[in-house]
Image: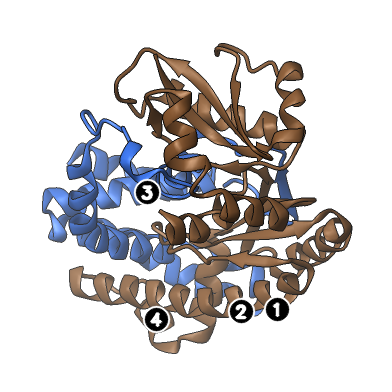
Amino acid sequence: MNLMVHGVIEASSVGVLASMNVPGTASPESVTHEDVAAVVTATPEAELFPTRANLLQHTRVLEALGARTTVVPMRFGVLVPDAEALVREYLAPAHPGLVGTLERLRDHVELRLRGRYYEPAVIEAVLAADPRAARLRGRDGFEAKMELGERIVAGIEHRRDQDIDRVLRALAPHASEVAGPTAVTEPLDAFLISFLVSDGARAAFEQRLDRLGEELAPVVALELAGPVPPFSFAAEQAAAWA
Amino acid sequence: MTHAPSTVTRRPQSGSLAEVIDIILDKGLVIDAYVRVSLVGIELLTIDIRVVVASVDTYLHFAEATNRLDLRAQAEDYDADLQDLIGGMSGAKTEGAMDAAGDRASGALESGKDKIKAVFGQDDEEESESEEQEAEA
């Protein structure tokens, strides 16, 4: 049996595994080395298929862990042959870094903020700022339409930079770390930014967020997901020790 | 997209698979020698095709969305002008769609139309007539 590795917690927290009940999955186990422990699930597979079930299992285990203790999440798809290899080739050599990351993430949560443009409102805003686009509006023919569409998209991009600035100025002071903005893939996506927020700063962060939501409406709709497993704040460290 | 959003939506967890997939596949700790993800069955090609098609499709979509946008709410003073403008548009726009004619263009127009239809659920009759013409052609 191979072991699918979900993440790393403090060894003193392995007791939380007993209280975890992730529907439809085998119970996760722990592999301990000194004061850190990897959380793993045994699997007969030799490689992991990124199926819906597998991806969700990994996510749900991390969410259940995160609700109970500090966890450094592992990327999906790490399979080790046995507990001994896991300790020898990872937990032991990466130990100092893991301890540091656990320390950094302790009493913090990752909150992911997504902004989406509300189409009619953002188009009105762009038209108001771009007289040429306003004149092209309603014009007939393929070329006029292409230029109009191009100007609207450019206008949204310009606005996006300003909106990101505004979000960061409002919320970064309440976060310990910020990751992103991640490059957007859809024209109506405004931004995707992750914040690492300490338990103590959470209420102030949420309050400022509510005000921000009112400031940006109706052009931008805000959506806050989390706490999510702190993937966005584990990656750099991982790269340094890989 | 039927109501203008007014406040922050909160979701207690990571949410849908689409939401988490990018993150859990390329962030987090790794043990380099032991990444064992099978890429069989992942349609990487669709991403490239998307990029190629995306810009034309996007521009046409926004042109259509802009042309169909009803600005009535914000400008009572210009109401008459706007009504003229919109009235003139709905005839011209159908011809424009036919001129553009390529499969890709009409695909984009169709999708733009659906979206706007969803936004302005019940439109005037003139609007639905011109949509029927497009659908027949």
**Marks 2 and 3 on same chain:** no
Q: What label does residue A165 carry, if any?
A: 2
Front position among marks 2 and 4: 2
Location of the N terminus of chain A by quadrant is: top left
Task: From the image, tell me which residue sits under label 1.
Answer: A169
Residue sitting nearer the eye, A152 or B44:
B44
Disc 4 marks which residue?
Answer: A133
- In the rendered image of the structure, the colour used to display chain A is brown
Cα distance in 3D space between marks 1 and 3? 37 Å
| Chain that the image shows in blue | B
Q: Are marks 1 and 2 on the same chain?
A: yes
Direction from residue A10 to residue A62 in the image, left or right = left
- Rounded to the nearest whole Å, what is the CA distance between mark 2 and mark 4? 25 Å
Q: CA distance from mark 1 to mark 4?
A: 30 Å
A22 vs B86, nearest the viewer: A22
- Name the amino acid type tagged 2: Asp
User: How far across and down, in percent of the image, does residue A86 sit?
Assistant: 46, 33
Label 1 amino acid?
Arg
Which residue corresponds to mark 3? B113
Front tag of 1 and 3: 1
Q: Answer whether labels 4 and 3 touch (C-beta < 8 Å).
A: no
Do the residues at discs 2 and 4 belong to one chain?
yes
